[in-house]
Amino acid sequence: MAGLIGEYNHTIDAKGRLSVPSKFRTVLGDSFVISKGIDPCLVVYSEEEWSAFQAKLNTLPTFNDNAREVKRFFGSGSAYVEVDAHGRILVPANLQEYAGLTKDVTIVGTTDGKAEIWDTASWNAREGKASPKEAIKNLFDMGIQI
């Protein structure tokens, strides 16, 4: 899925409403899924991306403790959201708390068909931790040559 790239600064209001960048709405449509991320952020999935991810989760063995914890983490930490007439979504309170979303929010594309929603202070604190040179070295170490 193309189109979920870039960095956008927005605010989340006291009611938990967050404007979605119009370029992202074009790709995601009027409804999509937001979920807890592995990092302290939320991950945005199109309904198709979420279905594919959920199918992978469903292959995990029911009788494995770690597998059940993973399913619980994503099952309880995800929500379908709908874009309102003003281009906003309502971020559930539990997801706002998980990601530490206060007022200033940064929405970033991840180039893999998903996006992330970060509290701006958290995003800024992690940005620049790896230099471009280090990032390229990490790609090479993973076998990805550009």
Image (tube, grey):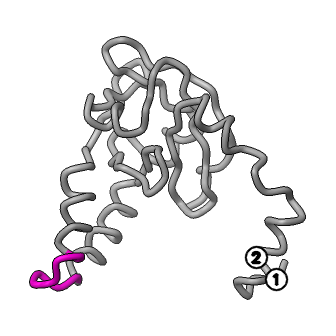
- Badge 1: residue crowd in 10 Å (few <14, some 14–19, many ≥20): few
Q: Which residue is mark 1?
A: 145
Task: Indicate the amino acid at tag 1.
Answer: Gln
Q: Which residue is mark 2?
A: 139
The answer to whether residue 32 is above or below residue 144 is above
Q: Compute the Cα span from label 1 to label 2.
A: 7 Å
Image quarter of the C terminus: bottom right
Badge 2 marks a residue whose secondary structure is helix
Q: Position of residue 90 (x, y in %)?
A: 31, 27
The answer to whether residue 79 is above or below residue 67 is above
Q: Is residue 127 left or right of residue 60?
A: right
- 65 is within the stretch colored magenta: yes
Task: Indicate the amino acid at tag 2.
Answer: Leu
Q: Position of residue 41 (x, y in %)?
A: 47, 44
In terms of secondary structure, what is the magenta stretch mainly?
A: loop
Q: Which residues are magenta?
A: 60-67
Residue at position x 41%, y 43% in the image: 29
- Label 1–label 2 contact, CB within 8 A: yes
